[in-house]
């Protein structure tokens, strides 16, 4: 059945606007993003296909544009809207969580990044910027590297910190292998950034390595001591 053939109160747009988006199913929410169907399928039927191909709504964020466009009826525009909505959701979620994080606890910081970074296929290096009171100013992506390593230049790290007048930073990056054990390169990078931060008056508080459901705080390992 096409969406326009449904009773007005059951159409996703009308239902979402007048009852609230929280009353829509996952399929209906996705159908709103897809917006239109094909001559053979409604937007709701296409949404069901997408969720089925992604093995459930939770894994939708792992799908690439190529995988989405391989589904019959999902072209560039529909794929782009789905990916844009997922990215917007991640950013809103990260901003909301960041405002409440306790930066004195590596576990709380790791929880802020875990669900997003544990599934990333490439190493991503990010920084959490804090003001003098310890409040989170922002979270910035510094670099995205190959599957095995990320090149991090101090200039890129502290450019964000200086621009936003940060007093301290927390470094965070992931290991796509799922094993958060810091490599020697991770330790060397940490000490190099600490030294640069000391010269600039910006403290590097910690460096967290995110794995699959696990993390390591380099500060807690005792390996963040400058000579």
Image: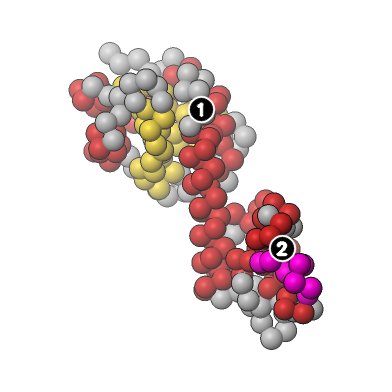
Residue 197 shows up from this direction: yes
The crowding category of the residue bearing disc 1, from other C-alpha atoms within 10 Å (few below 14, some 14 to 19, many at least 20), is: some
Residue, x 71% and y 57% (percent of image)?
19
Distance between mark 2 and mark 1 Cα atoms: 35 Å
Question: In what quadrant of the picture does the C terminus appear?
Answer: top left
Callout 2: helix, strand or loop? helix
Q: Quadrant of residue 157?
A: top left
Task: Determine the residue located farthest toward the left in the rendered image.
Answer: 199
Location of mark 2 (residue):
15
Give the tally of numbered discs.
Answer: 2
Residue 170: x percent and y percent?
Answer: 40, 28
Residue 114 is labelled as none
Please say if the residues under marks 2 and 1 sit with CB atoms less than 8 Å apart: no
In the rendered image, residue 134 lying in the magenta stretch gets the answer: no
**Residue labelled with disc 1:** 101
Query: Looking at this view, is 46 or 223 the one in front?
Result: 46
Q: Identify whether 220 is placed above or below 56.
A: above
Foreground mark, 2 or 1?
Answer: 2
In this orientation, does residue 149 appear?
A: no
The image shows residue 125 at horizontal and vertical percentages of 41, 40
- The disc, 2 or 1, on the residue closer to the chain's N-terminal end is 2
> Does 8 appear in magenta?
yes
> Which secondary structure, mark 1?
loop
User: Which quarter of the rendering shows the N terminus?
Assistant: bottom right
Q: Residues within 10 Å of mark 2 (few under 14, many from 20)?
A: some
Q: Residue at x 68, y 54 (%)?
A: 20
Highlighted range, magenta:
6-15
**Residue drawn at point x = 44 percent, y = 19 percent:** 219
Q: Position of residue 221 (x, y in %)?
A: 48, 17
User: In the rendered image of this protein, does residue 174 appear above or below residue 40?
Assistant: above
Name which quarter of the figure residue 39 lies in: bottom right
Q: Is residue 43 left or right of residue 209?
A: right
């Amino acid at each position: 059945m096409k969406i326009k053939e449904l009773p007005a109160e059951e159409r996703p747009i009308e239902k979402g606007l007048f009852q609230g988006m929280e009353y829509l199913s996952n399929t209906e929410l996705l159908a709103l993003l897809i917006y239109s169907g094909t001559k053979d399928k409604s937007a709701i039927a296409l949404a069901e296909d997408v969720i089925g191909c992604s093995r459930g709504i939770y894994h939708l964020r792992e799908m690439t544009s190529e995988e989405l466009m391989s589904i019959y009826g999902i072209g560039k525009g529909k794929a782009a809207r789905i990916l844009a909505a997922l990215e917007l959701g991640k950013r809103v979620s990260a901003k909301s969580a960041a405002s409440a994080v306790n930066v004195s606890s590596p576990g709380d910081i790791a929880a802020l990044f875990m669900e997003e970074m544990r599934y990333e296929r490439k190493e991503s290096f990010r920084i959490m910027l804090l003001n003098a009171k310890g409040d989170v100013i922002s979270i910035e992506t510094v670099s995205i590297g190959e599957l095995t390593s990320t090149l991090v230049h101090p200039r890129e790290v502290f450019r964000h910190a200086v621009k936003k007048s940060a007093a301290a930073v927390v470094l965070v990056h992931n290991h796509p292998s799922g094993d958060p054990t810091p490599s020697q390169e991770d330790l060397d990078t940490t000490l190099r950034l600490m030294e640069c931060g000391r010269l600039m008056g910006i403290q590097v508080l910690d460096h967290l390595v995110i794995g699959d459901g696990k993390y390591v705080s380099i500060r807690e390992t005792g390996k963040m001591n400058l000579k």
